[in-house]
Each structure stands twice: as structure tokens, then as C-alpha cells.
Amino acid sequence: MSGMNENPLDLLPEVLLAASAVFGLLLGAWLPRRRQWLVAALAAAACTGGVVAAAIAAAEPVETAFGGAFALDTVTAAGRIVILGATLLVIALAMPWTHAHPRETEFYVLLQLASAGALMLAGAQDLLLLAAGYLLASVPAYALAGFRKDGPGTEAALKYYVVGALLGVLMLTGITVLLAAGRSTSYTALRTGLAEAPPGLVAVGALAVLSGVLFKAGGVPGHFWVPDAVQGSPAPVAAFLTVVPKVGALAAFYRLGAVPLADAGLPWADLVAVLAVASMTLGNLAAFFQQDVKRLLAYSTISQVGYLLLPVAVVGRTDLDQKALLYYLAGYALTNVGAFSVVCALPGADTIDDYRGLARAHPALLASLVVCLLGLLGTPPTAVFLGKLEVFSAAVDGGYAWLAVVAAVNTAASLFYYLRWIGPAFLARGTGGDVRTSRTASVIAYGAATGSVVLGLLGGAVLAVLGGPIVR
């Protein structure tokens, strides 16, 4: 493992995204309005190049870059591929909606910067880089949430910003406390430093840092912004907010438990288990009564954080934790973007009742919705089914069988609200048959639904790759 590796090519996916954002901003200033789609094409090319670069880099030995601040390991590689892949799908979803928009260029620049922040979160091996990644993933996302400048959009952006600013300050305070306790911001140095520090000081600092990470993940107690921000945002932005920052944040959460806080003497497993139960239960209970489809998916995504926290709770207690988390993240990202693609494909259908008669009018679109919603539930042979199986196995193997039981009960309960959405689509013709559809979003919905099933079928091969070493 090399400590001082200063090769910028190690950060090629991140560099491509940042360079594309800067160049896109300059390009947009010169292009006529009808040609601004070239900025979106540039962003898509940067994401594609980043996925290829990340896949190639994944075969390299584990090391760190830039003084040990950024980890180049399996967690980073998987995070890069999922984040960039999801961003690419969101760009494709947004292109018809933003075409010839006065601020089309700004939309894609903000999208890329927020995505770059999520990449930094996934690979951060230093508390200062974690804070920088948090800010970069948050500030452009606030602007994206309020992009339409209408009433709901402004409310979405404001609530998102207020919660983010509060928990961001709390996170920076926690970083200061951990720096005082462990005498360093580097994860590797903190692992030994925090083991010898006063336990009370470490607990206060760790809780404050985790509150910021949970805000980005959209989990309890940092979840308050999720329903309003998702409902008030344009549908492509809602797809982005519920997937991309979440992947980066959960990778960061896992790394915090695996490295700096591993020997700190905190009741880590119990703490994360409580957060997991709170997230999945609150998300599911609140989703039961939703009529607005975006708000229903928003509460669904809070509950998904609960399941994703299972392998984080048992980090270091089992060999299944890392691959279970990374595989579930990939399956969740693909399936959730697929569900939002259906929402994008039917821009006039905002509530569950608006989907009445969809079976007769758009059967292929309904099939995609069924696959994605039952996929989020965890129905075989979708990717999330195998992901849930893996995270439940990791919890049991790590000595937290009760947590797996609670998660299984929550999964069964979530069937109710997914079926509440699917059911009316099979009823007699309603407004669902009259809603105009977006062809691009429909194609992405078909692709994501198919991809979710394919990833589930290829699960064994993918899981074998995700169990690689992590920088410690």
C-alpha cells in the first residue's frame, strides 16, 4: 500500500466529472438555446468514461491517494460505478424535460457537481475530505430541488437546505471533537488514536459526524427533508436525490465503522441497529397513507435506508457485510431509478388514482412499474431480493438475528403500499389511459426493470467481485 501516491489518474472518474462540469458551464455560455443539449451529452460522456475508468481501476491493488485521504479499494470502485451509472440514467431522464430550457446548462452542471460530491463521500479516508464531499454533494442538490422556481420547489429547496445546514454544522463540530480526541483527521491514524481517547468525547464526536452522514443517506433522524424535497422537485431530480447521495453516504457510513471507529469502544452495532429499525419502520408506516406517488417513493426510500444499515451495523463481525451492502446499493439504485422513470414517463399522473386504467393503455409501462415496485419489496428474481437475502444473512451471521427478523416483518408490511399503487392500474379505464407518455423515460423504465432482473440473475458473479479488500 502506498501512502503518498499523487497521481491524478487515480481520481480519473472524479476528474472527468469535475472537468465536464466546468467545461460544460463555459460551453453553455456560448451555445444557442436549442444546442444546449450538447452540455448534457458531454455530462453523459463523462459519466460513461468514469464508469469505464472505475471498472479498470477496480482491478488494481488496494491503495490510497493524496496522502492517504482517498481510498482506492472495492468500496470506492463499486460506489463509483453505481453513482456514475445512476447519474447517467438521470441525465437521460432529464434531457426531454430540460430541452431548450433557459437554464438547461446549469441543470447538468449542478447534477455533475452533486454527483462528484457523492463520489468523494464514497472514497473519503479523511474527515476533512468527508466534510468537503458532504458540502459538494449538498449545495448543488439544494439548487436542483428548487430548480423549477415554483411554490413546491422553493419549499422543497428551503427544507432541504435548512436541515442540511443544521446537520452540516453538527457534522463539522463532530469532526472537530474527533480531531481533538484522536489527534488526526486520517482514518488510519484515528483508528489507534480514538482507541486511547476518552470514550465520552469519542461518542459525542461520532454521533455528530454520523448525523451528517444520515442526512445525506436520508435515514432517521436526518430524514425530515426527504418527503417534501422529493415531492416538490422535478421527477428526474427526485430520482437523483433518492439514489446518488444515498450511495455515497452509506459507503462513507460503512467506512467510518470499518476503520476509524472500529476500535473506539462504542456500542456501534446497537446504535446502528436502532437507527436501522427506526428508518425502516417510520418509512413504511408513513408510506401506508400516501396518495402522491413521489411522496410514497420518498417514504419508501427512507425505509430502504433501514435495510441498507443492516450490514453497516455488523461491520467487522462477519465476512458478508461489505458485499451485502454494495450489492444491495447497486440493486436499489437500478430499481429505484426504474420506478422514478415510470413517474417521469407519465408526467400528468401525480397520484395513485391517476394510474387507473394503465394496464390497458400502457401495458409495457405498467409491467416495468410492477417489476420495480415488487423489486423494491424484494421479490425474486430481482436484484433487491438477493440484496435483502444477503443483508439479512449478514445480520444473522454478525449475531443480530433479531434485526433480520424486524427487517423481514417490515418487508412484509411494505407489500401493502406497493400493491396500493399497482392495484388501481388494473381497474377499469380511468385517467391513466389518457395521460401522455414520455418515450425516453419509458425506454429507461423498460431498461431499468430488465436490468434489475438481470442483475438479480447474475448475482453470484457480482457478489464474488464485491468482497475485495478495503483500506484500513
Image (spheres, helix red, strand yellow):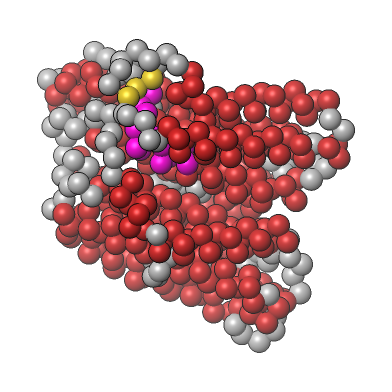
Residue in the picture at 22% in, 42% down: 315
**Residue visible at 74% across and 50% down in the picture:** 97
Query: Does the segment drawn in magenta span residue 129?
Result: no
Q: Which residues are magenta?
A: 69-81
Measured from the top left, where is residue 322 in percent x and y? 28, 44
Q: Is 75 covered by the magenta stretch?
A: yes
Corner quadrant of residue 216: top left
The C terminus, quarter of image: top left
| 106 lies left or right of 327 | right
The outermost residue toward the bottom is 428
Percent position of residue 396, x then y:
17, 57
Q: Nearer the viewer, residue 259 or 213?
A: 259
Asked whether residue 157 appears in the rendered view, the answer is no
> Please, is residue 104 above or below residue 342 in the view?
above
Q: Nearer the viewer, residue 177 or 98?
A: 98
Report which quarter residue 130 is drawn in: top left
Q: Residue at x 64, y 77 (%)?
A: 363
Q: Position of residue 411 (x, y in %)?
A: 34, 66
Q: Residue at x 63, y 50 (%)?
A: 236
